[in-house]
Image: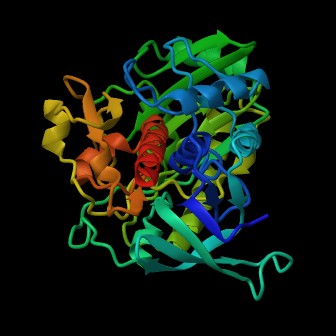
Amino acid sequence: MISNSYDLIVAGGGTAGCSCAYTAAKSGLKVLLIEKNSFLGGSITSSLVIPAMKTSENAINTDFFNLLYNELHSVNGASEYSDGNKGWFNPELTKIILDKLLKSVNVEILFESNIKSLDKKLSSYIATIENDNIEVFQNGLLSHIETKYVVDATGDAKICKLLKCEFLNKNEDKTQPINLRFIMSGVNINLFSKWLTDYDKDRNVTTSCYTDNTTLLSTAYTWDDGTNWALKPIFKEAVKRGVITEEDSNYFQIFSVAGTQDSVAFNCPRILDRNSSRSDAYIKGRESILRLSDFCRKFFPGFENAYISSIANSLGVRVSNRVKGKYVYTQNDLLTGKKFEHPVVISNYPIDVHSSDKNSSKLEKVNQEYQLPVESLIVNDNLFVVGRCISAEFEAQAALRIIPSCFSMGEGLGKYLASVNTESQQ
C-alpha cells in the first residue's frame, strides 16, 4: 500500500537505482522506487546490455552485485566467466530476481509510473506521481507524497531537469552513438564456438569457455582501421554482396547468454546518425537487426537455424545529460588516480568513447585504479544522482558508465543516505 511519507524516493529502477533502493531500505530507510517500465533492471533487462564488463579486483560497494549474482546463479541465470567476471546475467531472470531482492527489504515499487512534479518544502520534497492504474490513483495521479530525499536514477536526469538543475553538457557537442541490442536463439553454440576459436586465434578479441554446463563466448569487429580483425574479410564480403550495409558493419560484438544453450546477444547495431530522433533510431536499428541476422545465418557456422528471439525495449544510451553536482569529477582525477575521503566506486575500466566516425573511437587504458567520490552524486542536501547522469566530465563519465560501477555508486549512495538520515535523527 502506497504511503504518503517516505525517507527516500528513487526515480528509476535500473542497476544504480535498484542498488541504491535496496541498500537504503536494508539500512532502515522507508523507500519508494518508481519505475517507468513494468520491470526492473534498466540497461540489463530493457536494453539487453549483457554481460556486464569486468572491472577492478578491488572494487568497493559490491554487496548488491554479488547478491544478485548468487541469487541468479541459483536459478541458472548467471555464470562466472573464466576471467573471473561474474557479470554474465540472463536478462529475463534478472527481472524476477530483482523483484525478489527489493521486496525482501520492503522497498515499495510502483511500475509504469513517473514523477510528474516535485515541490520543495523546507527540508523535504512533495511528489506527484503519474500512473494509469485507476484502482490506486485518482485521475491517474497520486499527489502529496512527502520524502526527505530524492535520487535521480533515470539515466537521462529527468528529475534534475524537472527541478531545473544545472547541467554540464548544456553547451557541449560531445556525444556517443546509441545502439539497439538484440538476441538470436536457435544457435548451435558448440559448433559456432569451435569454428570461431579456430578461425580467430587472437584471444584478446575472441574467447570461449565452458562453465555451468554452458559455453560462454565472445568476439568483436569494427570497421576501424589499425586493428587486424579476423572477421574483416567476412564483413567485407557481406557488404560486397549486399547482405549488410557498410554502416551495419561499423561495430559488431556478440556474447552468448548465461543460462541458455542456444542464444547469442548482440551489442549492435550502433546508430551513427547524430541527428536521428530516438523514434528514427528504433526504426533504423530494427532494419539493421534484420540484415545482421540474415548475415549471421549465411556466414557463421551454427547460425543456420537461428532466429531473432528478442529486441531490446530501450535503446542503449552511453551518455546523455550530466548534472553539475557538489563535485565535478574530471578526466585528470581519473588518470592520476586521485584519492577521496568518501569514495563510492573503485575501478580501472578504461575511458571508452564510441564515435559515429570511422577511426575516431577511443579506448584509453588507465595506469592505476581510480575513485569516484560521493560528492559527485550530491546535487544538494536532498537531491542525488546515480548512473550515467552523474557529475563528471564527458571522458570521465565514459569510464564510469559501466554496469558494475553503477551498482557500486548506487550501493555507496544508499549507505551514505542511511548515515545522513541517522545523523539527522540524533
Q: Is residue 157 left or right of residue 24?
A: left
Q: Is residue 410 left or right of residue 127?
A: left
Q: Residue furthest right?
A: 135
Residue 351 lies, in percent from the top left, at 27, 38
Residue 120 lies, in percent from the top left, at 43, 78
Examine the rendered structure and indicate whether residue 129 appears above or below residue 33. below
Q: In this orientation, which residue lies closer to the viewer: 66 or 73? A: 66
Can residue 117 be seen from the camera position used here? yes
For the point 75% across and 12% down, the residue is 213
Query: Number of numbered discs present?
Result: 0
For the point 27% across and 34% down, the residue is 371
- Check the picture and name the quadrant holding the N terminus: bottom right
Q: Is residue 251 left or right of residue 361?
A: right
Which image quadrant for residue 333? top left
Q: Which color scheme does this rendered protein use?
A: rainbow
Examine the rendered structure and indicate whether residue 17 appears above or below residue 125. above
Q: Residue furthest bottom?
A: 139
Residue 103 lies, in percent from the top left, at 74, 45
Residue 31 lies, in percent from the top left, at 61, 55
Q: Residue furthest front?
A: 426
Can residue 11 be seen from the camera position used here? no
Q: Is residue 102 left or right of residue 346?
A: right
For the point 19% across and 32% down, the residue is 339
